[in-house]
Image (cartoon, coloured by chain):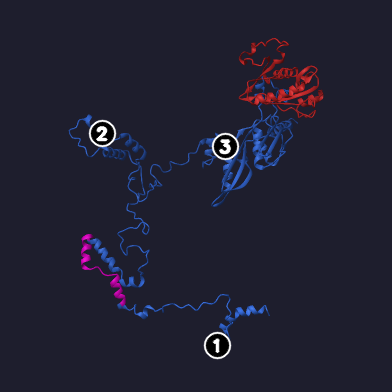
Amino acid sequence: MSVARPARCLLSRGLAATASKAGVAAPAPRYRASFHSSAQLAKRKPRFKSIRAEEIGLTTPEKIDEFAKEYFPQYSPEELEILRQRYTPEQMAALEAGEASIDPKDLTIQGRIRKDPYRPPYFDDFSKILPIVDKQPRTHPQPQEKVKFMSPEEHADDLEKLIESLIPKDVNFDGMKEEEIEKLLNEKVNLDIAGAKYFDEHPTLVGNDEPSNSAVAPGLGKNLRGVEGMYKQPVDPEDHGLDNEGVWQELKRKSGLTVKDILSINRTTKVLVTRWVSNQTRLGKVQRTWVLAIAGNQNGRLGIGEAKSVEANVAIKKAKQLAILNMKPIPRYESRTIFGSVEAKVGATIVKLDSRPPGFGLRASHRLFEIFRAVGIHDIAAKMPRGRNPMNSVKACMQALLSQRDPNEIAIGRGKKLVDVRSVYYNGKNVTYNMSTVSKDIEISQNKR
Amino acid sequence: MGVVSVVNMASHLQNASRARLGLTSVPHTKYNLKLALALHRTGFVSFVTRGGSRPPDPATIDTFEPEPLTTANAAHQRLWLGLKYTDGVPVLGSISPITTSKRPITANLRALGLLARGFDASHQRGLNIGECMFVTTDRGTLEIREAVERKVGGLLLCRAGP
């Protein structure tokens, strides 16, 4: 019961309406309970009865004519006379044609005359230009589509014109001696400034210094004769066609590496750490991707590159290029391990590296493993006794590798001869453990068999 | 005083090196003298000389003659040591005492051999590259490699390195 009641309350008005439409003789009593607690307002009525224009008689042809005559009058003969004095006959003809083409009746019925306080201060006066309401006129002709550089003759004419323009107009040079003329010119004309202006600002294109509709200087044409096809990226024959697009040219110039080397290093660059960082501004959080990449030539050079960008791909590309650019030589013992034990600390992360005998392998965490692989270290033990922050571990590892002491420097400092016992044991030969040499030895021994 | 003076000497030398001093002085004791001479043999210091409270001139150190030792001036004698640097980096980068008067640490020949080859022994880390350890034995205060050569063990005084 209590559930059904509200539904009846809500539906009662609608049900009553349908019932009355259906033509039932006795309309059901409406449920008049209001949904609001406040008193109902009386039904609003307009203060004035709405009367149609037809009922007043405003749409009759006579009334329309009367309105049009009042608001859109024809030019009187006196006004036409004044206009004729001001405009050429062609312009007058155009004016009259324009007047004739617009029916005042159309203006009356279709047009709307603004009477609001924000209307433009003119009705049909287009001689004035309001900067906010109207579009700016383009008084100057469009710049030339096909521009070209001056020929030597045009250059000469241009220079002649310029020099003529420098000669002061208000002086009569007749009957003056050459010295006097020279003195006068020195006084009146500042040749240094004129010369500087000529070299700095003077256009070298034909007709390119005309006044323009835009404050921006007109751009060069696309297909300039004599220039077309000459400004291609120069392809260095030393690259052997590896970089015809010029992608690696800047890195090549900065790093001094060949494109072949850069490409081979780039193949082994690795992104080791990625972080999503955000800058809290008053406009909100600006999210960016921070990337740390390493690059190594697997032969004793290692670099770390860090880059940040809104686009992750851009950050990766930048970080890899910076890593290649930042490559530094890392001292290695026998091209396979490090000299002694080193330790470096960045933040709370300590990286301890220990040299190990041949065949030991890389016993290190995955990021450090990648670093050692990139730099070409084959035997090492790494430990991080404290923090293992990804970024700090990579940086600390780099620091540790760079903090190795050169035995030669120690020997020079002490004035003593340091002897590499391993090298002495192996009869002074520098034993290398490159995989390539090992496999070669195996090959040779197999052939002997 | 005994071994305490060696402990103080080690700390003082490390401080002086890090402060990039050209020369410094330590008390003139038997332990200190022996260690200073061992450091000089190993090449960690450029010169060792006895002197008064005023330092000798480093420019003419080759011809410097200390005043004769008498009972009157013995108390004022000091050992003057010249410190070495290569490209602004001290040759004696770190020197830390091992034996203290409270806890003497000895090492026999086997332990010395292990330490010299870089393995841990006698509660000590093995020597790293360019590191030295100084042992006082009945054949005098020796660098660890000298001690191994002479097949003697002894008391581990300190370790020094770049």
Of callouts 2 and 1, which one flags the residue occurring earlier in the amino acid sequence?
1
Q: From mark 2 to mark 1, how far is it between C-alphas?
A: 110 Å
Q: Amino acid at mark 2?
A: Leu
Query: Label 3: which residue?
Result: A325
Amino acid carrying mark 1 in the image: Gly
Which of these two is toward me, B78 or A289? Answer: B78
Q: Judging from the image, what secondary structure is the residue with disc 1 in?
A: loop
Q: Is residue B100 left or right of residue A314?
A: right
> Quick check: can you spot residue A270?
yes
Which of the image's four quarters has the N terminus of chain A? bottom right
Is A83 contained in the magenta span? Answer: yes
Q: SS class of the residue under badge 3?
A: helix
Label 2 sits on residue? A185
* Figure check: A215 above or below A242: below
**Is A168 left, or right, of A432 in this rendering?**
left
Q: Are marks 1 and 3 on the same chain?
A: yes
Label 2 resides on the chain identified as A
In the image, which residues are magenta?
Answer: A63-88
Give coordinates of residue B32: x percent, y percent. Answer: 73, 19
Circle 2 packing at 10 Å, graded few (<14), some (14-19), many (20+), is: some
Chain painted in red in the figure: B
- Residue annotated with mark 1: A23
The residue that appears at 67% across and 41% down in the rendered structure is: A367
Asked if both marks, 2 and 1, belong to the same chain, the answer given is: yes
Tell me which label, 3 or 2, sits earlier in the chain: 2
Cα distance, mark 3 to mark 2? Answer: 58 Å
Circle 3: residue type: Leu
Judging from the image, what secondary structure is the residue with disc 2 in? helix
Relative to A196, residue A213 above or below: below
Answer few, some or many: residues within 10 Å of disc 1's Cα (few below 14, many 20 plus, some between 14 and 19).
few
Are both tags, 3 and 2, on one chain? Answer: yes
- Secondary structure predominantly adopted by residues drawn in magenta: helix
